[in-house]
Image (spheres, grey):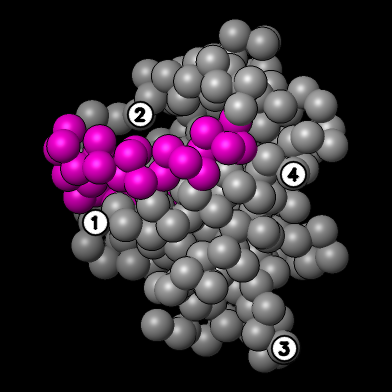
């Protein structure tokens, strides 16, 4: 699916095949290379940059593209420059979750290696702040280094939130940087809780209510 986006020759697309998902994973790996949450899992900078490619490839292929959508913005040449991964409200039950986990496990374990316990600890902290009612979750939003500060994150947010508001449900995210809280507030998200990982990294749980409630 392709939707015109603001700016010359830019389009928002939704990834549907493996090549698209893998390209999106590479953009996110670059965008999150210095993210505080990711640094708490992989403290070593070089190892983190390598591990994130495998981590995001597994999560895009086996998680977010199956229970949500992976939107991306392309440049004039058709290369992804910004990515937003969302988990939708229909995530299935325990069995479906176990199947997805099994499929993602080889890639995830290869990325985590000796950092498995740190990864599990972070996942548990995030799950503790996940709403229980049906909702959308913005899992990852990242922009390639050369394309930052050009409004691309806003374009992707506007695109998907318009769809969410057409079939109104609340939305949720966990913000990993204090300076991004203001961005999400402009789109109707508000801080519902501030908490920290075991490493001390601060995070902001943010929720956006159903607009028609």
Query: CA–CA distance between discs 2 and 4?
Result: 28 Å
Which numbered disc flags the more N-terminal residue, 1 or 3?
3
User: Going 46% across and 84% down the picture, which residue do you hit?
Assistant: 3
Query: CA–CA distance between discs 3 and 4?
Result: 27 Å
Query: CA–CA distance between discs 2 and 1?
Result: 18 Å
Label 4 near label 3: C-beta < 8 Å? no
Q: Main secondary structure of the magenta part?
A: helix
Residue identifier under label 1: 168
Q: Can you tell which of label 4 and label 1 is closer to the viewer?
A: 4
Which numbered dot is residue 50?
Answer: 4
Q: Residues within 10 Å of mark 3 (few under 14, many from 20)?
A: few
Q: Which residues are magenta?
A: 86-112
Give left or right: position of 62 versus 9: left
Q: Can you tell which of label 2 and label 4 is closer to the viewer?
A: 4
Give the camera-side residue of 1 and 21. Answer: 21
User: Going 38% across and 67% down the picture, which residue do you hit?
Assistant: 162
Which numbered disc flags the more N-terminal residue, 2 or 1?
2
In which image quadrant can residue 96 be found?
A: top left
Residue identifier under label 3: 76
In percent of width and height, residue 84 lies at: 53, 58
Query: CA–CA distance between discs 1 and 3?
Result: 33 Å
User: Going 60% across and 30% down the picture, which residue do you hit?
Assistant: 112
Screen quadrant of the N terminus: bottom left
User: Going 22% across and 62% down the picture, which residue do you hit?
Assistant: 167
Residue identifier under label 2: 130
Which numbered disc flags the more N-terminal residue, 2 or 3?
3
């Amino acid at each position: 699916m392709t939707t015109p986006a603001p700016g010359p020759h830019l389009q928002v697309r939704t990834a549907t095949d493996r090549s698209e998902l893998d390209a999106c994973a590479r953009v996110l790996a670059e965008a999150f290379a210095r993210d505080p949450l990711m640094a708490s899992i992989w403290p070593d900078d070089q190892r983190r940059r390598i591990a994130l490619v495998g981590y995001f490839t597994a999560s895009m292929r086996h998680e977010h593209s199956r229970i949500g959508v992976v939107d991306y913005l392309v440049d004039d040449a058709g290369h992804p420059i910004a990515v937003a991964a969302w988990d939708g409200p229909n995530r299935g039950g325990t069995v479906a979750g176990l199947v997805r986990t099994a499929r993602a496990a080889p890639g995830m374990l290869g990325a985590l290696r000796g950092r498995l316990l740190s990864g599990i600890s972070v996942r548990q902290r995030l799950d503790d702040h996940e709403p229980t009612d049906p909702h959308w979750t913005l899992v990852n939003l990242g922009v390639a280094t050369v394309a930052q500060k050009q409004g691309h994150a806003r374009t992707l947010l506007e695109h998907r939130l318009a769809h969410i508001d057409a079939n109104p449900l609340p939305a949720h995210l966990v913000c990993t940087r204090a300076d991004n809280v203001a961005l999400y507030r402009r789109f109707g998200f508000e801080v519902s809780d501030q908490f920290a990982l075991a490493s001390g990294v601060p995070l902001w749980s943010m929720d956006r209510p159903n607009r028609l409630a």
